[in-house]
Image (spheres, rainbow, N blue to C red):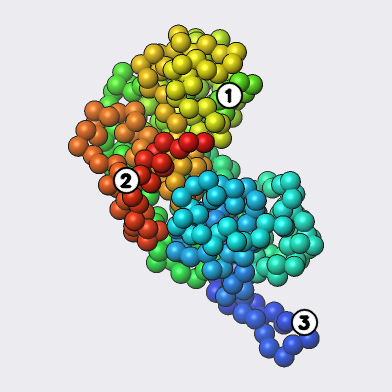
């Protein structure tokens, strides 16, 4: 697996605090786009501008103690998910540094951050740097090209460097890679004729149909879970698609992310205005799956990444997982990494979100 994160370069510089008689030890952390960022060895104030980041940070550290501000999108995601039950303090974190997706440098400085976290290509990176705040940019698609396990590993390594504690992050990385290895082993005996033909909808509602081709998360989930992505040849990574094209491709399986409110029943009962799904194989055979949402949406890199792969594989190949108790693995994962005991009702709400 490609590893873009180098070890921490310890004790690189000594920077004088303005006008003071003491010094602050720093080190170099290489971020997700291969920038060398100088940070204090002891980072205590992290400001997030990237809305999946809080779930990744929480699972990597077991705490929100060093996270002092998040985006309003992160708060909204936490409010509607189990994250707010596991870590209720996330709802108390300020969000005023980002308004309408735009970073406010003045508000950022009021938070006195040790580091600001965003992602590759985000305009807030330059805004924060001009304000004199160190910035870490996480890679989303530029490195892993949709390989969500690899991206999860990259994020864990960066967080481990920032906090100085890699024991927990190493354990998470090992768990994620073991999940990938186990899933590949289950799928290794499949022939091409055994793999269902699928489409992965990032957006599916009345006025927007967008799917994932190669280089995006949906392609990774389909192919690693034992399917064939029908968008592999003729569609870019994030592409519009028409109903006529859907009819021609006739997917046997459809996945829908939580970025759209549409649920499988909406397709089964033809409730989406202007769209007729009754002729599509996945709808006729009731093989439309809405992605779960645990601490975050399972579509993108987040704290629940290893669970998503097993869920997708079981969804497409229930015959291969006849003796597998996914609910039990969910409960074990949440107990181990979130120190939280999921109830049966909570498992059901994660697997069948109402939004």
Query: How many numbered discs sit on the rendered protein?
Result: 3
Crowdedness of circle 2 by 10 Å Cα count: few (<14), some, many (20+)?
few
Q: Which residue is mark 1?
A: 205
Left or right: residue 23 versus residue 254 is right
| Sequence-first disc among 3 and 2 | 3
Single out the mark in the foreground, 3 or 2: 2
In the image, 324 versus 260, the foreground residue is 260
Q: Residue at x 53, y 46 (%)?
A: 80
Q: Are marks 2 and 1 in contact (CB under 8 Å)?
A: no
Left or right: residue 232 versus residue 31 is left
Q: Which residue is mark 2?
A: 344
Left or right: residue 49 versus residue 170 is right
SS class of the residue under badge 1?
strand
Position of residue 72 measured from the top left corner of the image (x, y, whole percent): 65, 51
Spatial separation of the CA atoms under disc 2 and disc 1: 30 Å
Position of residue 91 measured from the top left corner of the image (x, y, whole percent): 58, 57
Name the residue at the front extreme: 345
Q: Residue at x 25, y 41 (%)?
A: 325
Spatial separation of the CA atoms under disc 1 and disc 3: 55 Å
Note whether 158 is above or below 234 in the view shown.
below
Q: Which residue is mark 3?
A: 18
Q: Residue at x 44, y 64 (%)?
A: 62
Single out the mark in the foreground, 1 or 3: 1
| Sequence-first disc among 1 and 3 | 3
Spatial separation of the CA atoms under disc 3 and disc 2: 55 Å
């Amino acid at each position: 697996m490609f590893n873009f994160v180098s070890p921490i370069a310890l004790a690189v510089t000594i920077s004088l605090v303005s006008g003071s008689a003491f010094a602050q030890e720093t080190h170099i952390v290489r971020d997700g786009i291969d920038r060398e960022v100088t940070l204090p060895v002891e980072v205590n104030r992290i400001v997030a501008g990237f809305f999946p980041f809080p779930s990744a940070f929480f699972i990597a550290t077991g705490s929100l103690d060093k996270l002092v501000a998040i985006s309003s999108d992160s708060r909204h995601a936490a409010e509607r998910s189990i994250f707010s039950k596991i870590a209720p303090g996330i709802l108390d974190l300020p969000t005023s540094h980002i308004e309408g997706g735009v970073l406010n440098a003045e508000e950022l400085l009021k938070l006195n951050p040790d580091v600001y976290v965003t992602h590759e290509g985000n305009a807030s990176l330059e805004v924060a740097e001009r304000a004199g705040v160190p910035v870490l940019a996480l890679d989303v698609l530029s490195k892993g090209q949709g390989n969500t396990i690899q991206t999860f590993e990259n994020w864990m390594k960066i967080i481990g460097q920032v906090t100085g504690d890699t024991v927990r992050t190493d354990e998470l990385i090992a768990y994620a890679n073991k999940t990938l290895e186990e899933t590949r082993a289950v799928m290794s005996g499949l022939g091409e004729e055994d793999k269902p033909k699928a489409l992965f909808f990032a957006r599916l509602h009345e006025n927007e149909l967008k799917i994932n081709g190669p280089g995006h998360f949906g392609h990774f989930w389909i192919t690693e879970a034992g399917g064939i992505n029908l968008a592999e040849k003729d569609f870019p990574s994030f592409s519009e698609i028409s109903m006529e094209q859907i009819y021609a491709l006739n997917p046997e399986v459809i996945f829908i992310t939580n970025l759209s409110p549409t649920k499988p029943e909406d397709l089964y009962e033809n409730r989406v205005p202007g769209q007729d799904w009754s002729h599509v194989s996945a709808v006729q055979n009731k093989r439309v799956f809405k992605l779960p949402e645990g601490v975050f949406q399972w579509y993108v890199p987040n704290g629940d990444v290893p669970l998503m792969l097993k869920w997708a594989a079981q969804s497409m190949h229930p015959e291969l997982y006849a003796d597998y108790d996914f609910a039990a693995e969910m409960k074990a994962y949440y107990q181990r990494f979130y120190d939280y005991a999921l109830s049966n009702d909570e498992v059901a709400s994660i697997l069948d979100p109402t939004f």
